[in-house]
Amino acid sequence: MMKKLLVYAIPVASLILLIVIGVIVTSPASEPADSGIPAEPIANDDRYSDLTEDMKYYRNPDYPQGYSNAVAHLEVPQHPFMASNDRNNNMHCDAYMTDTSEVSGPLGASPQVISSYLGFKMCATNLFDAEGRIMSMCANVSGPELRLHDAETLNTLATYRLPDRPQGWEEDPIGPLQDTSGGAYFYIDPQYRAVMGTFNLTVQVIEYDEGLGDFHLVREYDLSDYLVPREPPERDKLQPILPDWNGLWWFVSRYGMVGTLDQDSGVVHTLELEGEELQNSYTIGEDGVYIISDYAMYRFHADGEGQPVIDWRVEYDRGTRCKPGMINHGSGTTPTLIGDVVAIADNAEPRMNMMFLNRSSGETLCSIPVFEDGQSATDNCLVGLAREGENGTEYSVVVENNYGYLGFPIVDKGRSTVGGLVRIDAVPDGSGGYACKQVWSSDEISPTTVPKMSLGNGLVYFYTKYPREDMIDAWYFTAVDFETGDTVWRVLTGTGLGYNNHYSPIFIGPQGGTAYVGTLNGLISIRDTAP
């Protein structure tokens, strides 16, 4: 289907929307000024003054301070219509959605934690502009906004107010905890402008003006006529907007619409996947657009007119239920492209499977079940890389277990989830095929974070919490060795509800030696202070 889209060019700041996944805590009656003034390096509540030094910081005695072990890998291509990969041009770092960075993250060398308290306003998605400043999507129940932060102090430099959810959202069967629309999946283009789908079903392009010292809206495209009609109070939701390798924008909606949008002409083409939900982000390769629904994995391309065309469709085992820790009934992973493979997790029972599919055909190269029976689920993208092995290209993914997370109370009063991490490799089997094997497992508990890997130092970063009989809710930034699965170091970020990341990803800063995590309090950074 093809229609002409009305394009708005707006030279002044205008409202945009973002909901960061499930932030529904109530704001304080009066918030502190938006100064971003850092808290103490380690936030200590008086109730927890008895925390010993080993509770605040741990280093594995088998790993010396400054341990680094860069990982050989096949380079992830730079998308021509997105900002530099080292700036984290979207939530998952690059167009292949590998959640890896060439930059060396923190090594745990006298790490310092800085908190920017924003009064229960979580800055979940944190990308970096040409000057290294942080472009953050921040939200609470009262409304979302785009912020610019100083990467060192976390001070707020500019704030752009975004529109709230549409009226009547309280009655929508997809509530805030299951709604991933509204801008959390925004990306930055080569001009370092934020591009996002909004709650009011528009695509908006927002730029920070150095002269004005503020954000302004560059263009707006109305997509409200192109989503799936629903009977109120249901309402279709605009999910991520991403460009393909020709610069054509693609968009998807929660209730199964796949579309393209020509930025110059405003022409829209759509294809509905009837009866399927599209809850996750998707992946852009040179060969097509990889989209996963709650039933099947797809690859699309656009024909000469811009119409979405299905190259292949492969159904996976979606299981029998929406497991605790999952947002909907189906795969919780954004597809990860690594070399000639696309990696996903299904939602099978009693254990979900890690699956490696051929990019050209969708054929399953190998799959393997992970974690324990009846306690296996992930709703986060996989960390993935490809590298040359003795017998050909080998593919690796690291996955965390989110099973059991049902919101804030589940990890309150010293409680946590079942946890677990695994690394799975797909390796040539000597007969032209591939075999999946589990390389290592870890007991670390990372309830909900989107992990990141530093290819420059070989560490995979998680945001962890462990059950405690003393009922202290202590949250940690934790580094795991990609090769062995050993925990190398961890540092306390803070205690209490405000330090729950609630599905917020980790981001590695382009300056090196620093990482960032959004929490219910706002934003924190973890940086090395010693060589």
Image (spheres, rainbow, N blue to C red):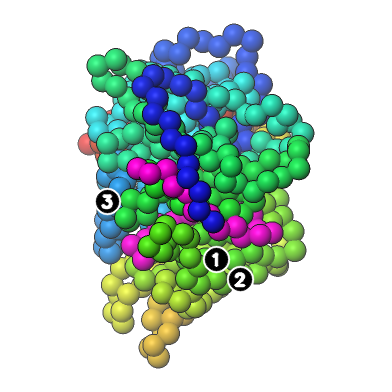
Q: Quadrant of residue 167?
A: top right
Q: Are the residues tagged 1 and 2 within 8 Å (C-beta)? A: yes
Of callouts 1 and 2, the N-terminal one = 1
Magenta range:
264-287
Residue closest to the eye, 429 or 489: 429
**Which dot marks residue 297?**
1
Q: Position of residue 101 (x, y in %)?
A: 32, 49
Q: Which residue is mark 2?
A: 315
Of callouts 3 and 2, the N-terminal one = 3
Main secondary-structure element of the magenta-colored stretch: loop
Give me the residue at 36% from left, 22% from top.
11
Q: Is residue 124 above or below residue 358?
A: above
Which image quadrant: the N terminus?
bottom right
Q: Position of residue 27 (x, y in %)?
A: 62, 18
Marks 1/3: CA–CA distance: 25 Å
Say what amino acid the circle numbered 3 marks: Pro
Which image quadrant: the C terminus?
top left
Q: Are the residues tagged 3 and 2 within 8 Å (C-beta)? A: no
In this rendering, position of residue 42 left or right of residue 471:
left
Say what amino acid the circle numbered 2 marks: Glu
Give me the residue at 66% from left, 36% from top.
176
